[in-house]
Image (cartoon, rainbow, N blue to C red):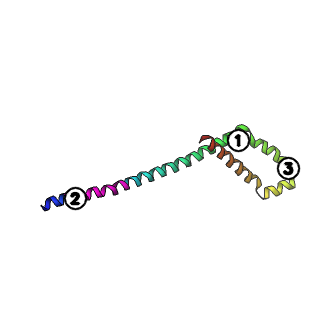
Amino acid sequence: MEFIANFFDSIWIFFESLSDFATDILVKVSAWYVIWVTKAKIYFVGFSWEVAQEVLNQLNISATINQYWGSIDSKVMGALTFFKIPEALNIILNAHLTRYVMGVFK
């Protein structure tokens, strides 16, 4: 009789461990999915950056900005360059264009 009781206890323990096994599998799969989505987003940002750079080159925005930038008074230009305003404007322009490209691809 003890054999039968042990047999059913073993079956009961097996079925109780199935929920833990399923939970572990779902956690692993979810973690892999989150990592994959994060890597995909990082790749997508790089791709959008390259597209934004190409759009800037095609529209010739940099040449227009340089043309108008060259017409600024030298004293004002010195102050703006000292505070690194051109670099800041470049970063803002590229960031907005990259965000726009990412919105188009969504």
Numbered badge on residue 101: none
Please tell me which of labels 1 and 3 falls first in the chain. 1
Q: Residue at x 74, y 39 (%)?
A: 60
Local SS, label 1: helix
> What distance separates the C-alpha of mark 1 from that of mark 3?
22 Å
In the rendered structure, the answer to whether residue 10 lies left or right of residue 46 reads: left
Q: Position of residue 101 (x, y in %)?
A: 64, 42
Query: Is 70 contained in the magenta span?
Result: no
Q: Secondary structure at mark 3?
A: loop
* Mark toward the start of the polypeptide (2 vs 3): 2
> Is residue 18 located in the magenta-colored stretch of the structure?
yes
Q: Earlier in the sequence, mark 2 or mark 1?
A: 2
Q: CA distance from mark 2 to mark 3?
A: 85 Å
Q: State the residue position of label 1.
A: 56
In the displayed structure, would residue 28 be above or below residue 65? below
Three-letter code, disc 1: Leu
Image quadrant holding the C terminus, namely top right
Q: Amino acid at mark 3?
A: Ile
Nearer the observer: mark 2 or 3; the answer is 2
Say what secondary structure mark 2 lies in.
Answer: helix
Q: CA distance from mark 2 to mark 1?
A: 68 Å
Q: Quadrant of the N terminus?
A: bottom left
Report the magenta residues as a range: 8-23
The picture places residue 44, in percent across and down from the top left corner, at: 57, 45
For the stretch drawn in magenta, the main secondary structure is helix
To which residue does mark 2 refer?
A: 10
The residue under label 3 is 72
The type of residue carrying mark 2 is Ser
